[in-house]
Amino acid sequence: MSGRSHRPRILTNWALARLNAPRQTPSAQDWIPAKVPGAVQIDWARAHGLPDYNYGQNVRAYDGLEDSHWLYRTSIPQVTRQPGERLFLVCDSVDFECEIRIGGAPVLYHRGMQIPFEYEVSAHAPGTMVEILLFPAPKRHAGPADRTQASHVTKPAMSYGWDWHPRLIPLGLCGETGFEVRPAAAIREVNFRYALAEDFSSADLSVEVVTDPPDRRYSWHLVDASGKTVLEGIGPRARLENPRLWWTHDHGEQYLYTLVVELPGDEPFRRRVGFRRSRLVMYPGAWDDPMGFPKSRNNPPVTFELNGRRIFAKGSNWVAPDIFPGLINADTYRPLLQLARGANFNILRNWGGAGAPTEDFFGQCDELGLLVWQEFPLACNLYPDDPDYLALLDAESKALIRRVRQHPCLALWVGGNELFNSWSRMTDQSLPLRLLNRNCYDLDPSTPFLPTSPVDGMGHGDYRFLSDGQDIFATFQKARNTAYSEFGCPSASPVDYLKAFIPADELWPPRAGTSWETHHGLAAWDPPDPTTWLCLGALETLFGPMRSLEDAVEKSTWLQSEGYKSVFEEARRQQPRCAMALNWCFNEPWPTAANNSLVNWPARPKPALASVAQACRPVLASARIPRFQWRAGEQFTAELWLLNDRAVSQPAGILAAELILGARVIPLREWSYTEVPAQGALAGPKVTVVLPDTDADEFTLRLTAERQPGWSSTYRLSLRR
Amino acid sequence: MSGRSHRPRILTNWALARLNAPRQTPSAQDWIPAKVPGAVQIDWARAHGLPDYNYGQNVRAYDGLEDSHWLYRTSIPQVTRQPGERLFLVCDSVDFECEIRIGGAPVLYHRGMQIPFEYEVSAHAPGTMVEILLFPAPKRHAGPADRTQASHVTKPAMSYGWDWHPRLIPLGLCGETGFEVRPAAAIREVNFRYALAEDFSSADLSVEVVTDPPDRRYSWHLVDASGKTVLEGIGPRARLENPRLWWTHDHGEQYLYTLVVELPGDEPFRRRVGFRRSRLVMYPGAWDDPMGFPKSRNNPPVTFELNGRRIFAKGSNWVAPDIFPGLINADTYRPLLQLARGANFNILRNWGGAGAPTEDFFGQCDELGLLVWQEFPLACNLYPDDPDYLALLDAESKALIRRVRQHPCLALWVGGNELFNSWSRMTDQSLPLRLLNRNCYDLDPSTPFLPTSPVDGMGHGDYRFLSDGQDIFATFQKARNTAYSEFGCPSASPVDYLKAFIPADELWPPRAGTSWETHHGLAAWDPPDPTTWLCLGALETLFGPMRSLEDAVEKSTWLQSEGYKSVFEEARRQQPRCAMALNWCFNEPWPTAANNSLVNWPARPKPALASVAQACRPVLASARIPRFQWRAGEQFTAELWLLNDRAVSQPAGILAAELILGARVIPLREWSYTEVPAQGALAGPKVTVVLPDTDADEFTLRLTAERQPGWSSTYRLSLRR
């Protein structure tokens, strides 16, 4: 089914038992209440009083629960059915592998979170027992206990432990699971596709409806946003003239139509649809890049073109907003996606190590005008050319493509994360990636596909404010990548937030083996830096010994705010060669002590988010500042720029640059800039000034655009004596 | 059909008429005799006395013949058939688009050279007229009159004009075309596939037989090279234990089995089959390549692994051995392929601009132990995302894959030539390439696939002895590519060869607008160098003004011989990072005045072939010499190396280096080398010597390996005063 069924579901009560052996029959006292959707860990914790896994190091109390077999149980409800109506057990998503038994007899084997399953129970009497036996979480080998255990399945690898995700491997019925009454003639599946004319003057629609029994007559119509029917069809094909296009919020309207499919006797099927064309194109001038002999290939295109317009992709890497997929719903996504839009982002990358979001996520992105880069569930592992894995990936990827291709927000399919790097060791010849390219070509050829990120020319990393003796400002000013699809700059979480989950006696100083480490503040990154993500070393290099928790958090927040701003703006200054800046990462699945994220779990923005939002404004004054920290008496320099992501040029004007040191304001110069080109970056003069020898330990560069208050920018920099 | 039918064909006489309009009925005097397989141009030339296109500038007399409609005509032969037997018109290949008419009525439309066509004529009386109306050669636009006219079809682009191929666009029935009697129950198609166990201990065979009528009972058996039946099957699947593997000639035996399929009432179907595993793998140490942040991907793998053994791929670029595919047969291939094997090559790249060879080519490569890199017919063009083109490419590519995948010599599928470069402007998102990946994945997943050559890390070019102020020795010593899949070093053809097709009054000096230019000696390359491929500028830079044709040919041959040797050996010195050296090109479709080829048309080796054969010996002494030309009194240096492509190491020994100037032999030094690693390159000491001031204008560096006479090498270098 492309998306979940449109009929109401009858929900029943579930019980759960942990088994010692797959075929064990639980005794009465083994049964505990189960919440569906949910996870066995949550039910078990509730029943047995396990402490909150989000607090301190409690997460370790959940170790090993994923290695048991678990049995869910409910019974077929008493339902009044009309003649011909049928009853089905329906499950939207299971995590991860199960056997379904009706009245004690196995009837279905299922695995994979992307593929809903169903089983007809019409012939079974109400009260008949329905059991779902969950198998233990897949582990390719006993050790090491890390992501490589998930390298043969489509279960998200992050749960096996990541530098921002604890090792806690969910199991359970994580999608809505219940019973559904279906009429004698039912709509089984609706596949909506379209091909836009090259000039967007029309869209050739295909509305493929699978009915049960097959080939029943159906009708459909398309309703515009005002409620007016604009097209009616009885066959699968029709042409819509002058479709209104769907745009990202920064480039136009998020126009959505509603498709209604009707089959006599069944409830109408409705879904919102939109029209867009997404392409990856070469950047202007890319083919002119000089290359000597022997000549290799040009870099692959990674510039998004939406509806024929080249756009600069600004955004972030989305990860699962909770450890447990069964706890995620529309209300989980809403505040996060609103923060993303508020940050002037126009794209989110659904990173391959996390599970794919549900329909609510994509529906909200459709509404908010956020593009989605969707990866398949492969990340940082060597997924094998193995028939069993290929069969699973084939089924899961087809289900995911069929579901998501119907959303206008979908911009790009990607095979997975960092698969062509030494820590994964997959290659262009890996059959899983050739399979994914095949499935995307077969099912959604008009959406671009990349085997992985990064491809040639794109960059991932760095993830530290200081590395190899230079700061993040300098690193990215030297880089010349076509896209920055991951770059990180960590900070500690706010003090009050830390106090909510780190025991008071562990708070300061941060020590190895404490909650700081459990929550990724220390020894998080591979290759391990003993103080990532708190990065005490960098803090002390720049500012000297940290005096308190408050001091460390304040300084680290400052670095993250200015660090991220510097990269987003530098990437935009490098357009059109560079066409994308997506920081790692946007959100997080649980409270982190320190992380590269912009938003703390569940949806609490960190201070850097506001800086990023400033750097991602459609039009702004920008400064290329060689580095973050300066010394009194030294000559400070900065290049002035104007950045414009709009499709229209911006009028000429005057930009003033000033330095602010405490109470002093030092005018630097005014720049009479010319018209700022559409979708371009305009370089201006360099300002220079000898930094006065004051007591200040910071100063601010302020850029003010005359008559354009919304373009003004400030940069808060460090000053040492 | 995978490969042509196994039944004898009844051949009839054909006549041909050139039409003024598609529906014109030719009059009696319009008909000329036609030779099938052949081409309309050849028949027309024979009937109308056109001069030999290979001579002088006669080729221009053939201009425009491809723009007519042409009508082939024969009649259904009188054949005695048994009850139930059927009669078919069968054509192995048509160039390029046609309509088949029986008794005046159109019955079939066909296009594409890879797809045979057939039509049942059992119901038609003997003597019924059979016509095949050929459409004009496809041209996407009226101008420019170059390869871009073929950018929407699978017809080979070379015919539209290349720097070594005249503009002469064949049309005609280029494959055997005739009539076939089929028994009541017939074998229609045999698809042989296999999967080798990871340790090669067994092969799971799949013998899929399509019968007409469907699902007739058949049996098959596999016969080994001694004639012994080693496996019998009645179903499509069986396991062969301990299959003997097929190897390239330099790594093992070319073991072939014979598959025999039997269906009662039909003739047995036989084909030779072999077992090999071909993979593209990362070179040893590739994953360790240091890369700073931001990190991009590692280069894609281009190291061949045959049957689990990494091999260095040495070979050349194969182009069509004739302008007219209808003139090519087993005897055309045989001497050329024997020359390739004699040159110690183990691979040929079937370049995408030429048509794919016939079964004879692949069968001979199976026997000779030559790997084949097979490209689809795309080259240096922007092939469109257009439904009509995609449908044609889909059908043609499937036919090609089904046919060629059954040959053990097949090593690699490649989408086409130089498609990701500025002169083609296709990208990873181009649907034709995604389609080809899809078809290769679906039909032959165990053979590697690359979208194009070069991919990242691989190099194409240069194609000149001197460029950018340095010679080919220096260019490649500075290069660090993972594979050199094209590099050229041109020479003039031998004097007697030139005299055979360049009129005497044009022979010297070479002038623009003469046969020199028509035959690519001048102004051939794009971007045009006025004297490519003769490269008079380079000859005069190195040697001063050329005094005669003989002088120019001798010098140019010297440059090609030493130039090619230097690149093949340098590529091998750079192993394992570099894993391939394929020069551009091996052969040619007609006589060239100058070209990068090693063998003149039709199969006459140029002197450089012997040098290349020396450079490609499995084991040899090698010298890295900084440049080709030296000055008397200057200090000459060279690094000594030993190169070993064998799978076993070579024993330690002593290598002596000497300089030979005229009658003088100057001993340089002896190197007591250690064991030479298997599949490796061993670097030795540098020799240095001040070049004496003599009258000689050349000198030779000679390397002699004690007790290994076969390893000795010489380098003939230029000396100026």
Image (tube, coloured by chain):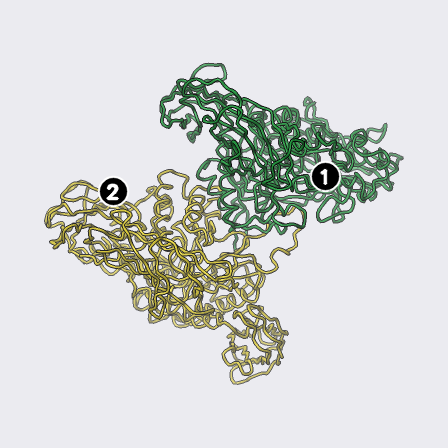
Chain colours: A green, B yellow
Residue at point 49%, 48% (across, down): A387
Residue B156 is situated, as x and y percent measured from the top left of the image, at 35, 51
Residue B272 against residue A633 in the figure, above or below: below
Residue B607 against residue A678 in the figure, above or below: below
* Residue at the disc numbered 1: A489
* Residue at the disc numbered 2: B109
Where is residue A641, by image quadrant?
top right
Residue type, mark 1 in image: Cys
B171 relative to B319 in the view: left or right: left
Label 2 to label 1, Cα distance in Å? 63 Å
**Could you tell me which chain the residue with mark 1 belongs to?**
A
Where is residue A131, by image quadrant?
top right
B711 relative to A141 in the view: left or right: left
> Is there any visible trace of residue A703 in the rendered image?
yes
Q: Secondary structure at mark 2?
A: strand
In front here: B204 or A417? B204
Where is residue A478, by image quadrant?
top right
Residue A96 is situated, as x and y percent measured from the top left of the image, at 58, 38
- Most extreme residue toward the front is A27
In front here: B14 or A21? A21
Q: Quadrant of the C terminus of chain B?
A: bottom right
B611 relative to A254 in the view: left or right: left
